[in-house]
Image (cartoon, grey):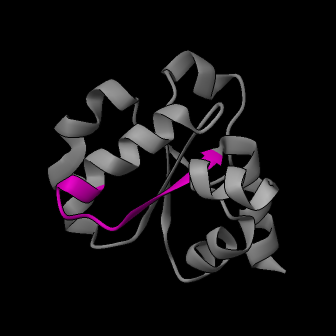
């Protein structure tokens, strides 16, 4: 059952760790206020409603993107938007889960 939930929300800590270790960037799509209340060490805050405006700069970075938010819902939408624009993106789920994967990638 937990595999189903991970697949549904698109979060798999081991592959997220691998992607981060390989140089993926982390985009937190929560609001700036939510981001200020706690976020991952190297994550960038680009709220979901502004992701379209940042598409060109994200594309220029030519890196895999892992999206995160509070629960995985907004980050799932952001990953779909980025994929539709031709950017390799994955839904990392909750920001705290992505942060744990980032720490794991450093071990």
The residue that appears at 67% across and 43% down in the rendered structure is 95
On the image, the x and y values in percent for residue 93 come to 62, 46
The residue that appears at 19% across and 64% down in the rendered structure is 86
In front of the other: 64 or 76: 76
The residue range painted magenta reads 83-93
Quadrant housing residue 81: top left
Q: Is residue 91 above or below residue 50?
A: below
Quadrant where the N terminus is found in the figure: bottom right
The residue that appears at 50% across and 22% down in the rendered structure is 32
Q: Outermost residue, top direction?
A: 33
The residue that appears at 59% across and 50% down in the rendered structure is 8
Q: Is residue 48 above or below residue 11?
A: above
Residue 89 lies left or right of residue 23; in this view the side is left
Report if residue 79 lies within the magenta region: no
Report if residue 89 lies within the magenta region: yes
Quadrant housing residue 62: bottom left
On the image, the x and y values in percent for residue 89 come to 39, 61
On the image, the x and y values in percent for residue 24 come to 49, 70
Q: Is residue 44 above or below residue 21?
A: above
Quadrant where the C terminus is found in the figure: bottom right
Residue 105 lies left or right of residue 62; in this view the side is right
Number of numbered callouts drawn: 0
Q: Outermost residue, right direction?
A: 107
Quadrant housing residue 48: top left
On the image, the x and y values in percent for residue 66 come to 50, 58
Q: Is residue 18 above or below residue 9?
A: below
Residue 88 lies left or right of residue 8; in this view the side is left
In front of the other: 94 or 106: 94
């Amino acid at each position: 059952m937990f595999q189903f939930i991970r697949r549904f929300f698109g979060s798999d800590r081991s592959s997220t760790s691998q992607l981060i270790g390989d140089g993926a960037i982390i985009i937190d799509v929560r609001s700036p206020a939510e981001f200020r209340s706690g976020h991952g060490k190297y994550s960038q805050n680009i709220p979901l409603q502004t992701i379209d405006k940042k598409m060109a700069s994200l594309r220029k970075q030519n890196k895999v993107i892992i999206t995160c938010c509070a629960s995985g819902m907004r980050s799932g939408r952001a990953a779909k938007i980025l994929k539709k624009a031709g950017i390799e993106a994955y839904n990392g789920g909750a920001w705290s889960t992505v942060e744990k994967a980032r720490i794991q990638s450093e071990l």
